Image: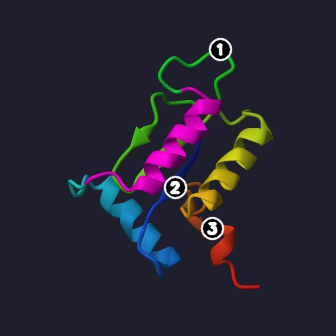
Amino acid sequence: MSFDLSVWALTDGATPEDVRTAVRQCRQGQHVDRYPDPRVVRFYRAITASYPDRQPTADTPWAVAPLHAAHDHVELNLHPDCADQVLLDIERLAGEHGLMLFDAQDGSVYPPPARVNT
C-alpha cells in the first residue's frame, strides 16, 4: 500500500473544497486538455531532480513511477516507509511553487505557506 499525495495548481482564491472537487473529477477521468501550468512543471522538475521517477533507483520513494503529471497536478504515490525528508521536500516545493497539497489518506488540503493566514 502506498502513501498518496498530490499537488494542485488551481486559481488564486481556490478553497480546499475546490481541490477536493478537482481530485474527484480526475479520479472520474474528467480531464481538460490544457497546456501544463508552469507551477506544476517547475514542481515536477524540482522533485524529480532529487528523486528521479523515470529511472528510479533501489531506494526510490515512489511506489508508482513515473509520477502521474497532468496540466494542473502531480500525483505522488510514496512507499509508506519513505524517508521523512521526502515528505518535507514535497511540502517545501509545493509551497515554493504556490501549489495546494492534497492528502489522499484523509482528504486534508494544505495551502502553500504564503496562503496561510496567521
Which residue type carries mark 1? Ala
Residue picked out by circle 1:
58
Q: In this picture, is 66 found above or below 88? A: above
Residue 58 location, quadrant: top right
Label at residue 81 = none
Which residue type carries mark 3? Pro
Q: Which residues are magenta?
A: 35-52
Residue picked out by circle 3:
112
Q: In this picture, is 66 found above or below 3? A: above
Determine the residue located farthest toward the left in the rendered image.
33
The image shows residue 16 at horizontal and vertical percentages of 52, 75
The image shows residue 60 at horizontal and vertical percentages of 64, 24
Quarter holding the C terminus is bottom right
Task: Check disc 2 and report its element: helix, strand or loop.
Answer: strand
The front one of 24 and 31 is: 31
Question: For the residues marked 1 and 2, what is the alpha-carbon distance in whole angstroms?
Answer: 25 Å
113 with respect to 84 (left or right): left
Residue picked out by circle 2:
7
The front one of 102 and 71 is: 71
Prevailing secondary structure class for the magenta stretch in the rendered image: helix
The crowd level at tag 2 (other Cα within 10 Å; few <14, some 14-19, many 20+) is many
Give the residue at x 52% y 52%: 6
